[in-house]
Image (cartoon, helix red, strand yellow):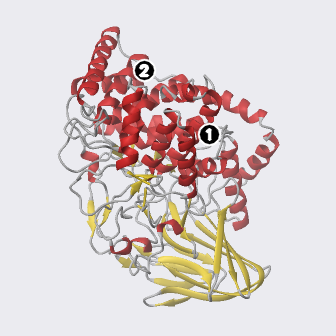
Amino acid sequence: MNEPYAPIRDYALIGDCHGAALVSRTGSIDWCTFGRFDAAPAFCRILDATRGGSFSINPAGEFESERRYLEGTNILETLFRTSSGSVRLTDFMPVGRKPGSSMHDYVTLEAPFALVRILEGVEGTVPMKLLYDPTSDYGRHRSLLTTMKGGVTASDGTQLRTGIDFHVYETEGAAAQIELHAGDRRELLVYPAMARVPDIPVQQLLDVTRAFWEEWMEYSRYGGPHDAAVVRSAMALKLMTYAPTGALVASPLTSVPEAIGFGRNWDYRFCWMRDSALTLYALSVLGYSGEARRFGEYLMVACHASYPRLQIMYGIDSEAELPERSLDHLEGYAGSRPVRIGNGAYQQTQHDVPGEILDWAHLQRALGSRPRRRTRNFLAELADRTAENWSEPDSGLWEMRGEPMNHVYSKVMTWVTLDRATALTGSRKQKRGWRRTADEIVETVLARGIDPNRGTLMQSFESGDLDGSLLAIPFTGFPIDAGVFGRTVDAIREELSDGPFVYRYRTDDQLEGGEGAFLLCSFWLVDALLWLGREKEARDRLDELLAASNDVGLYSEEIDPDSKIFLGNFPQAFTHMAVIRTASLFELFEKEGVDGIRGSNTSRAKQLIGATSGPMALWDAFRQSGRLGRFWSSKQSMLKL
């Protein structure tokens, strides 16, 4: 890999549920968007080491660093150690609560749109160097900087507010050098022109932000194995929610390559219906209901924008048009062109998406959320269209950009659409028709989706190749024979696995270069082994996967099995959803054995968190946890912002 680029696993994520930033182990912020995940970044060095711009803070000489998130928060703390002393750097994006919001309305944030960095001398004396180099329009323009009393202002209105004296250089941004002694503290605050920065001390911003994250985490009901990984994954998923609408982005980043030096680079700063439904399942089994309510509202607005067609993804403000274009002035991460914004896959047909939505709606109904008539009518329309079109080919779960095929996973999910619809909505006539079509789908999949020679499921009716999505089929409740599924799992272990890691497929997808192993599929293989009762192998694989996260518990989309280099956008909601799902399956397995994890998402969720889950149920669980006093303490801190 080119040296100017930090390894993807060296980054940590901070954010405010509006925008996000990536901080490297060396204290450099190489990506930062304010106000919206899909906004043009103030820093995007991760996409071009020369033009992208960054904000770096680190010791002037040789140093070592270690870092962590403050417990129960998304506040990052990096400790730099040198031969002369040590310094602590705290990074976060402040959050706040709308005045008068209830304790359950924890997804409604009013953030000041700022980036805060706090330097503290821990011991000795450490010379520090700081470089502030913002750019605009994805690095097309280097911001014209001007020093002012108390900071630096940029030509686009972005400001750095600090008591540190910076010197502006014509081509290298603004730089400063300071010596930090034990007990010294320096504060730096970056905010864009549209920011609503309150005139309150930075320490109070820190206290309020910490209280917010601690309170949110207190609502988790999880008490199963691998608690640390589950907590960090939940916190990462929460960071990827867009507070104003309830949308969930697949990743806060664009165009980190799936193969270094090639063009498999995609913009994931949008809301995929599938990813969101699966993510909300993961949050639901932890006891969170507010995110599901907000997403339901977003879903109806987004689908109206493209009516009568259901898209696979929408913008975070429900935008239906997401045209894809290349930014040719950027060299891409480690020279991997092109950098893309927008995503042309929004025009694809993927038959599994209605199934994910109906499955999620079925889960929400079982947990006590009654869908409105408008929602039920919408779900019935999805089922009717699925009944008409299920036999047509599609682009599949992995969004292959070649000719559509009859993907087996997609066919199974059309069955899910009709199966869940019969339980949720529709007239008697509709229900009878949906059930007949669902039975026809089962017969077709079992007749055409199983390889007649080796008795395994196939990627598609047209191809006998294997596919990682097949590992998820029994968890839908689809009536698949355990012998067929067992042979499929063994074949995937043999042909698609490399150690604990699993590739999505080996099929020619008509794209340049290869790709890494897909971490979602790697966790799905663990789930599949547990479904088959192979507990020992499942546990061993899970231990290896959990050890493959970076030092602060985050995962990318893909990984190189040999070098453990992270590939693809980072962090990835799909992967962190899978961490929670797999851990919850082990929790169920320990209680109920194989029978406890079979069936549908709804049956598993009901076992994990009870038959109902609403505001009062959450409040009762919270009250009984013995943490009520801590909650009210954080509540008072919230009201100060």
Q: Residue at image x 50%, y 43%?
A: 526
Asked if residue 288 can be seen in this view, the reply is no
* In the displayed structure image, the side of residue 469 where residue 228 appears, left or right: right
Q: CA distance from mark 1 to mark 2?
A: 24 Å
Q: Residue at image x 63%, y 81%?
A: 150
Residue tagged by mark 1? Answer: 105
Tell me the SS state at disc 1: loop
Answer with mark 1 or mark 2, whichever residue precedes in sequence.
1
Residue tagged by mark 2? Answer: 373
Residue 1, percent from left and from top = 40, 76
Residue 3, percent from left and from top = 44, 81
Residue 335, by quadrant, is bottom left
* In the displayed structure image, the side of residue 118 where residue 48 appears, left or right: left
Residue 640, percent from left and from top = 73, 54
Check the picture and name the quadrant holding the C terminus: bottom right
Kind of residue indicated by mark 1: Asp
In this view, the residue in front, 596 or 152, is: 596
**Where 637 sits versus 307, above or below?**
below
Tell me the SS state at disc 2: helix
Kind of residue indicated by mark 2: Arg
